[in-house]
Amino acid sequence: MSLSIASTIALSALRAAQVGIGVTSSNIANADVDGYTVKTANQASTVAASTGSGTAVVSITGGVDKYVFASLVSANADLGAASVTASYTDRLQALMGSTTGSDDGGTSVATLVTNLQTAVASLASSPEDDTVQSEVIAAADSLASSLRETSASIQSLRSDADQQIADDVGTINEALQTIDGLNEAIVAAKAKGLTTADLEDQRTSAIKTISSLIGIRTTTASSGAIYISTSGGTALLTSSVHALSFTASAAMSADTVLSGISVDGKDITGELTGGEVGGLLTLRDTTLVEAQDELDTLASALIASLNAVTADGSAVPAPDSLAGTAKVASTDALAATGSVRIAQVDGDGALVSYSDLDLSSYATVGDLVSALDAIDGIDASLDSSGKLTITSTTSGAGVAIGALDGDMDGGGTSFSSYFGFNALFTGSGAASISLSSALSSDAGALAVGTLSSSTTIGATVLTSGSTTVADGLLSAMTGKQSFAATGGIGSTTVTLGDYAARVVSDYASRAAKAEAAETSAETLAGSLSDTIASQSGVNIDEETAKLSDYQALYSAAAQIIQAANEMFEALLAAAKSA
């Protein structure tokens, strides 16, 4: 072998060692950089005229196993959904409170229902006691406030989820743009024979970002570009970006019409079942809606059950005016039967006058209101919102209503219930339930008395000692009633207190299941990440050993070059002296 060939071979080894040292040094420097994969300088022998001419670094490769990475993409989507679900259900559980424990048991919805039941039980024992009446009103007010606040907080959670979806969509679109740019750079580099390892690391990191937010599929083209679609098959990245479109709602209520997610004008909301976005959509449109529905069911049952009892009672003394809470129209048709008594009672509960109306005589609400207004000493009218007011115009006398056998709709609804007189609660659900305004301003307006059936003028027909209403309230609180299947609670027949406890426990159960699902998803994703790290991560000990090897190779190649140079110089010197 000639000295020139030896020098050339040694020089190629020197250059290869330099590249190896550079790659290994970069590996060590980036060992703690998230998403960085170990790079390898791949060498090959070079041949010239059938004779070995040295070595060369033909490529620098890195990256992760595509099959393991595909599994990680799927696992990331599951983890994203599980994590956000666990976070929100935990917050929801905190809103609902707990049926046990000294810390939060005193403020849970279930506990407040029990508090009201306890106050009503005391009222049944002492219906004439003003203090006990005030306790009932305070307990009812606390319960109504808790239901409203919890309802508002549920809608706030839905609003948070809606806004987080918007943020995630923005992140996904940015990542798609990043991958699109990296695709172009990788394709161009491959065409020039340049290494793309670092660019591929950046692209892998961006893909991982998207996969944690939505379920995706990836396809690698022969050019080196990666194309992305949703797990449902909608293209997100081809030769161009197909951006997701979403608009968060400015305000949130149970009736708000919420935006879906679209791509190129196509609504793909139903496809997005994985990732953080999929979890948020489920929370926003299902889980939290079911929470609201369960709360509304409880509130509606409270309103209907307790108002039906207080409606046929009367405050003692009888008030000058009764204002209904139900909205009706004068043109509403009636199919009423039986009779109702409209009485005027003085401050001592003595009967001043009365009129019994045959309800079957009136075809419409307007006809009935006209008949009421025609009673001597009584004014009756519907206000602009359709609520009936009955007022006594007789000095010193209030107005009280006797249910008798009246049935306003064929379903047993009394006259007072139909128009919403003497209501304990107003509203139609958890968002609107409230203590009636009459009770808020005057605890004495609680309808604990009952008009007796006596028709003797001057006879006592209304006393605060009657237990009819109080017993009815206690029966409504402790008696079982049927609830249709709602949210996560199946159809059941239980007391109001038991149903409230089921609402609370349902979301404690959901939170526990979500936490378990998150733990499982974390374990799988962590295992796959560890596998990738062991395969593609930087091992400092191994890279340090490689660095020593490259340094030794570099030193050996340099020594060969130095020896060849010395031999050349010796030959030249010999030639000159010859």
Image (cartoon, grey):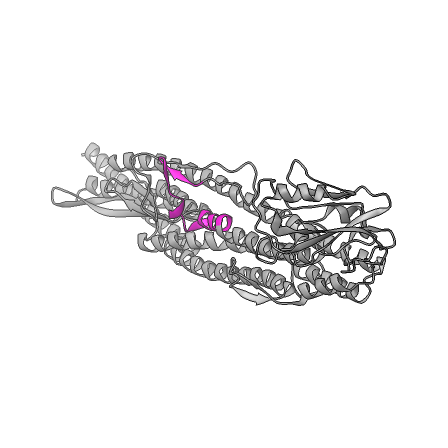
> Looking at the figure, which quarter contains the N terminus?
top left
Q: Residue furthest top?
A: 576
Looking at the rendering, which quadrant does residue 392 occupy?
top right
Q: Nearer the viewer, residue 326 or 517?
A: 326
Q: In the figure, 389 relative to 412: above or below? A: above
> Looking at the figure, which quarter contains the C terminus?
top left
Q: Confirm whether the magenta stretch covers residue 255.
A: no
Q: Position of residue 291 (x, y in %)?
A: 56, 54
Q: Is residue 560 visible?
A: no
Q: Is residue 482 visible?
A: yes
Q: Residue furthest left?
A: 50
Q: Nearer the viewer, residue 571 or 365?
A: 365
Q: Confirm whether the magenta stretch covers residue 271.
A: yes
Q: Nearer the viewer, residue 263 or 306?
A: 306
Q: Position of residue 563 (x, y in %)?
A: 28, 43
Q: Residue at x 49, y 52 (%)?
A: 286
| Number of on-image labels | 0
Q: In the figure, 137 relative to 562: above or below? A: below
Give the side of residue 8 with respect to residue 331, left or right. left
Q: Position of residue 7 (x, y in %)?
A: 24, 41
Q: Residue at x 59, y 49 (%)?
A: 154
| Residues shaded magenta | 260-285
Looking at the rendering, which quadrant does residue 102 occupy?
bottom right
Q: Position of residue 400 (x, y in %)?
A: 77, 51
Give the side of residue 491 with respect to residue 115, left or right. left
Q: Nearer the viewer, residue 7 or 211?
A: 211
Q: Residue at x 69, y 66 (%)?
A: 475
